Image (tube, rainbow, N blue to C red):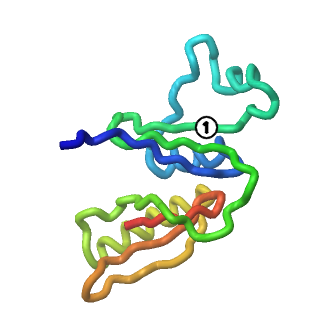
Amino acid sequence: MVSVKQVQVTFDCAEPERVARFWCEVLGYVVPPPPEEFATWADYDRTLPAEEQGAWFACVDPTGVGPRLYFQRVPEGKVVKNRVHLDVRAGTGLVGEERLAVLEAESARLIALGATHVLTQYADEENESCITLQDVEGNEFCLD
């Protein structure tokens, strides 16, 4: 039997720190401390060659349960829908109008942080409601 490995979710983006800080707010994640010899990540960043400055940023689940999120700068912009996306589980265990109200409230909070509303899918005979949003660089994710 194969053991379960920890995973890191990597985002390609234009502005790694901006996108990372958005996801910190969405998920309650934190920026890990910089290397011991540096007071801040900005101090560390200034020691890198110019082309590497601001090239990546990361955030972590403060409880250690969730995956590390890593954001790396790439030259190309987003062209098509994500092949992989995050589902933010804001309405777990809720159904009907109660679930929709929680999802809509969370959606409003995230839009205030810079997210964009894409689609609200309302409950039907088979599925509960969910909301599709985009982060600050247009990457789709779901509130469910």
**Label 1 sits on residue:** 57
Residue drawn 70% across and 38% down?
55
Which quadrant would residue 34 be assigned to in this image?
A: top right
Image quadrant holding the N terminus, namely: top left
Between 6 and 64, the residue placed more toward the observer is: 6
The residue at the far right in this view is 50
Between 24 and 70, the residue placed more toward the observer is: 70
Label 1 crowd (10 A; few <14 / some 14-19 / many >=20): many
Provide residue 108's location: percent of width, then percent of height.
51, 65
Viewed as shown, does residue 22 lie left or right of 100? Answer: right
Residue drawn 81% across and 30% down?
50
The residue at the far bottom in this view is 125
Provide residue 139's location: percent of width, then percent of height.
58, 62
Q: Is residue 78 above or below residue 75?
A: below
Image quadrant holding the C terminus, namely: bottom left
Provide residue 118's location: percent of width, then percent of height.
56, 75
Provide residue 138's location: percent of width, then percent of height.
63, 63
Residue drawn 44% across and 44% down?
28
Q: Is residue 33 above or below residue 64?
A: above
The residue at the far front in this view is 1
Q: In this view, does 2 lie above or below 108?
A: above
The residue at the far top in this view is 37
Viewed as shown, does residue 48 lie left or right of 4? Answer: right
Question: Total marks drawn?
Answer: 1
Between 32 and 112, the residue placed more toward the observer is: 32
Q: What element carries label 1?
A: strand
Q: Which amino acid does label 1 sit on?
A: Phe
